[in-house]
Structures are given as structure tokens and as C-alpha cells.
Amino acid sequence: MRSAFAAHLLSAMADSLRIRLASRSSLARASEGWCIEMSPERSSAVPVRLGVVALASAFFSFVLASGTVGGQQAAPRANTARAMAPVDFTGVWAAVITEDWRFRMVTPPKGDAAGVPLNDAGQKAAEAWDPQKDIAAGEQCRAFGAGGVMRMPIRLRVSWQDETTLKFETDNGQQVRLFRFGGSQSLTGEPQWQGQSVASWETVAEGQGIAPAGGGGGGGRGGGASPATQLTGSMKVLTTRMRPGYVRRNGVPYSGGAVLTEFFDRSDEANGDTWLIVTSTLDDPTYFAQPLMTSTHFKREADGSKWNPRPCEVTLPLETR
């Protein structure tokens, strides 16, 4: 039925062209369709041209609305998280540790929680840390959970698992974080080291600006979005249902009720360097007097030649080796 209607519109457009040729020496009459009265010397072109434009507009509006051309279904516009990504996070990234070096590159002494806003319960738990107990319980990954792994000396390998899931892998600890787009998740199963993460792209209303013309790729840029709905380059990730873990390798704790909020941004510098900046807030009323906020930096590498996967391990403080 749609094809027949489209054919009828095309036929009407052809008739309008014949009318144009026949009306060069006389006024076009409104009753013949789409024409307005004006001087004879202008009537031959403009009135009928308006009619042709009107018909063409109607035809293409019909095609776009129906999604059908010649009986063939037009390809739908992609609307997945990957297709709408305003920035490309894929690739291999190395942690650049220029702050908190003694807490991140080595294991500090037991009970040393400087900079972490622990409450009394948190400080007591930190001072009770027993690394041998973790090893005996098979919980060597406590420092590699979502609440602490991004502060470890790691490399990240980022790729799209599917159209709505962005995958972050770590070489040190061999952890996998899955950031799922598309709203809330069903909270099922046991808590995991990496918890459950819900991701979203920031919008103009929620973020701080519009993404530049360049810098997209890998996941697409959502081309065609209007300025009112243009996305920024930030990805927000909310992680819950984590197993209790450590924000540092010396047993500084976070509980299973902690909530981790992260913002991921990419920065392309004039010298060719590309940076991934992760700004995080870990909120844990059980062990923290206030949320713990950090900013962590990763530099993009040309390839994966330095990727060095190795399992979780408990690293003893320097003083006890």
C-alpha cells in the first residue's frame, strides 16, 4: 500500500512538470493545483515550481516516516551506547603515579591510613589487618576490588564487549569491570569484587559542556544529535554490590555497603599524549567519616606490548619483609 502511494506521488510530480511546460504563455489557475496567480511572465515557472517542491517534500517525508524505499526497509539509525559514544576510551592505558606514591607503589605499614577519612570503626579494622589471614581465606583480591583497583599500579585494556557494555580489564590482578549502559540493573547474585556498574554518557544539562568536533571514534560520536541533546565527553559510572575490600593494600577497608561514583574523561594534548582521567567518590558510612575522593590518571599507550597479566597477590609491608 505504501509503495502504491509513493508511486502515485511520483506520477503527480511528473504531471506537474508537464503543466509547467504548457503554462508558459498563460496564467496558471489555482484550480489546476498548487498555483497562485501572478503576472504572466512569472507564472510559468514559480507557481508550478512551488507545486513540485511541495510534492517532493511530501514524498520524502512519507519515505522517512515509513522507512521504505521501493519496498526495501531503510537501515535504522543506531542508538546504542557504543554508537552514541562522544569519546573513545578503547585501547591500553598505563597508570601514571605522581601522587600518593608510598601508598600506591608499595604497601605502607599496617594502620597507616593517612588521607583516608576513616571513622573509629574503620581505623580499628585497618589496625586489625592480618595479611596471612587473607591468604589463608583465598581473599588475595581484597585490594583489587572496584573500590581500590584503579589506584593500583596497573594497565587498563578497554574494549566494547557488546553494543551496551564497555569492558575495563586490568593486567595486575586480572580483574574485569563491566560498565553497562541502559539504566538500572537487576540486583541478583552474590556481591563481586567489581560489583555491579551502571554507566551513562553525560548530557549538556548534566555535564559542563559540549564535546569538541574531534576526539570521538571507536564507539562513534552520535553524529546528527542536535545541540540541545549533544553529549559531552564524560562517562559516569555508579557501582554498588561490591564485596568488602581495601582502598589500599595495607588493609584500609571499605564495606559491602559502599557506593562508588566515577567520572571518566579523555584529554588529547597538543604534544600527542592522550590521558584518561578518573575522578571518583567512594561513600561508605560503615567505615568512613566522609566520602573519599580521588583523581587518578592513565596515559594511553601505542599498543599492548607492555600488557603483563598476573593474578592478585598480597604484598606485605616493607617493614615485615
Image (cartoon, rainbow, N blue to C red):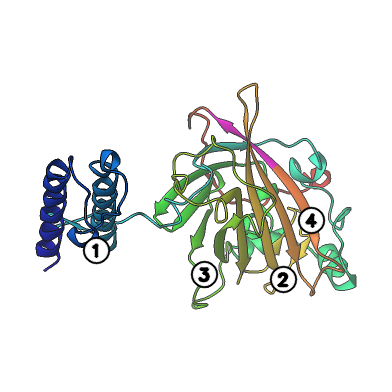
- Secondary structure at badge 4 equals strand
The amino acid beneath tag 4 is: Met
Q: Name the residue rendered at 50%, 58% in the picture.
A: 178
Q: Are marks 4 and 3 in contact (CB under 8 Å)?
A: no
- Secondary structure at badge 1 equals helix
Q: Quadrant of residue 26?
A: top left
Distance, label 4 to label 3, CA atoms, is 24 Å
Q: Which residue is mark 3?
A: 183
- Secondary structure at badge 3 equals loop
Mark closest to the chain's N terminus, 2 or 1:
1
Q: Is residue 300 magenta?
A: yes
Distance, label 2 to label 1, CA atoms, is 53 Å
Q: Which residue is mark 2?
A: 255
Q: Is residue 188 visible?
A: yes
Q: Are marks 1 and 3 in contact (CB under 8 Å)?
A: no
Q: Nearer the viewer, mark 1 or mark 4?
A: 1
x, y percent for residue 146: 63, 59
